[in-house]
Image (cartoon, grey):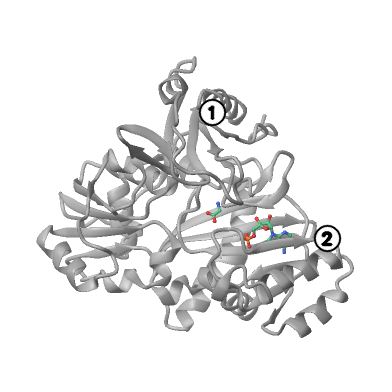
Amino acid sequence: MAKLRCPDTVNVLLLGTGGREHALAWKLKKSKRLGKLWVEPGANAGILELGQVCPEPLNDLFRMTRWCERENIALVVIGPEGPLAADYATKLEDYPKRVVFGPTKAAAQLEWDKAFAKQVMRAASVPTADSRVFHDVEQALAYVETRVDGCVVKATGLCAGKGVMVCRTVAEAQRAVEECLVKKSFGDEGKTILIEDLLEGPEVSVLALCDGSDFWILDAAQDHKRVGEGDTGPNTGGMGAFSPTPKATEELLRIVERDVLVPTIDALKRMDIPFRGVLYAGIMLTPAGPKVLEFNTRFGDPETQPILARLQGDLVELCWATATKQLSAVDLRFDSRAACCVMVCSKGYPGNYAKGVEIKGLEAARAVPRGQGEEIEIFHSGTARRNGSLVTAGGRVLGVTALASTGARAAELARNAAACIEFDGAFYRKDIGRQLA
Ligand code: AMP
Ligand code: GLY
């Protein structure tokens, strides 16, 4: 294996303010190469405990790049899709002095434009639901009338996991079309919609680190998108996740590699778009084989919490290798233990919810009885400090993540710890990981 070329000390700027970024910050802090960790203003209370706040506003590029130079920022890690779609990967890079972990806007189009993703998949024969694109409300309504077996209506832009409406009846599909094209509930992100076939089957999240040439598939995870137990109610950003998942067998991962990842990365390459960062394929295991539901171009949230809890190795090195085309010089290993994350949320999520509600019980959650080799990590998602107290600041508030020898035990431990978190209106799904042995 080639030797990784990476500075001994790397100052890192981490963009993003939520649970995924708290997990990234936590893992970056364990790196022997980390110099100073800088984080965004507005980061949650957990992230703020780990990093120093960058004093410049992200949208003032001139001041931002000057500041990066002054502070010798060598690596920028971009967590969320927003800054990727705004092309901060290109704007903040000053190769080779400063490299960015995260794809360019052109590559991130796989996520911020679902119609583009479909085009790429169609051109590369990647298995996915058949779909049509609409801008016009009359045409869309006429089309859904023919979809008596149900369909899925999707805003093509970025909607924080909320722009997908699974419709079992024509009436539901009509309402979904009107939501996007008449009420404009998703603004410009929903002015173009996809209407696609309704698929059935369990879902897995397959994430790969790609450096523009090589890629590493991470251990897969299973997310829980619906707000209610038994997968009921509206879609959310994700109510909990575990990794590994028995659904993602070696054989399945080889099929996803061969039929999804390789052809997608190659199709982008042919368009002169190298993909560098995390390519996340949301896969449904249908009776006709695995099909892509969506691509994300970043770590998933909450999948990142259980994945990083199990990832062995140095995250600064992994990010550096990804950003500098050196993935062949790093080794990727996972803890043999299983991890499960349960999100504790604010009442009302994914709709409206209160903020600023005092949170208690973190110490009790960390102290939940456990056996040898079992661990609990609490990642903040939507939290803030107000007069010294920890308060809620989002719909998803805390991600309680446990590690244990089996998935079932990790899930039990995560639930036990989540039960200790107290704030007015706190709720979590009690069925995350129940299906695990
Ligand atoms: P997406 O953001 O595209 O992954 O969609 C969010 C969730 O909606 C997925 O995790 C699925 O549960 C569901 N979904 C998306 N597309 C389809 C589809 N074609 N058929 C059935 N369910 C879907
Ligand atoms: N948990 C799904 C996502 O990150 O998009």
The residue under the point 74% across, 40% down is: 230
Horizontal arrangement in the rendering, residue 325 relative to residue 416 (left or right)? left
Residue 422 location (% of width, % of height): 51, 27
Kindly tell me whether residue 213 is visible in this rendering. Answer: no
Q: What residue type is labelled 1?
A: Ala
Q: Is mark 1 on a helix, strand or loop?
A: helix
Q: Mark 1 points at which residue?
A: 418
The residue under the point 48% across, 18% down is: 368
Q: Pointer 1 and pointer 2: residues touching (CB < 8 Å)?
A: no
Please give the label number shown on residue 51.
none
Horizontal arrangement in the rendering, residue 188 relative to residue 28 (left or right)? right
Horizontal arrangement in the rendering, residue 97 relative to residue 402 (left or right)? left
Q: What residue type is labelled 2?
A: Arg
Query: In front: 256, or 13?
Result: 13
Horizontal arrangement in the rendering, residue 258 relative to residue 386 (left or right)? right
Query: In front: 243, or 48?
Result: 48
Q: Is mark 2 within 8 Å of ligand 1?
A: no
Location of residue 412 by image quarter? top right
Residue 21 location (% of width, % of height): 38, 49
Q: Is mark 2 on a helix, strand or loop?
A: loop
Query: In front: 43, or 299?
Result: 43
Tell me which label, 1 or 2, sits earlier in the chain: 2
The residue under the point 54% across, 71% down is: 264
Mark 1 to mark 2 CA distance (whole Å): 33 Å
Residue 425 location (% of width, % of height): 58, 34
Residue 208 location (% of width, % of height): 48, 57
How many other residues sit within 10 Å of disc 2, few (<14), some (14-19) or many (≥20)? some
For residue 222, above or below residue 69: above
Q: In which quarter of the image is the N terminus?
A: bottom left
Kindly tell me whether residue 17 is visible in this rendering. Answer: yes
Q: Quadrant of the C terminus?
A: top right
Q: Mark 2 points at which residue?
A: 168
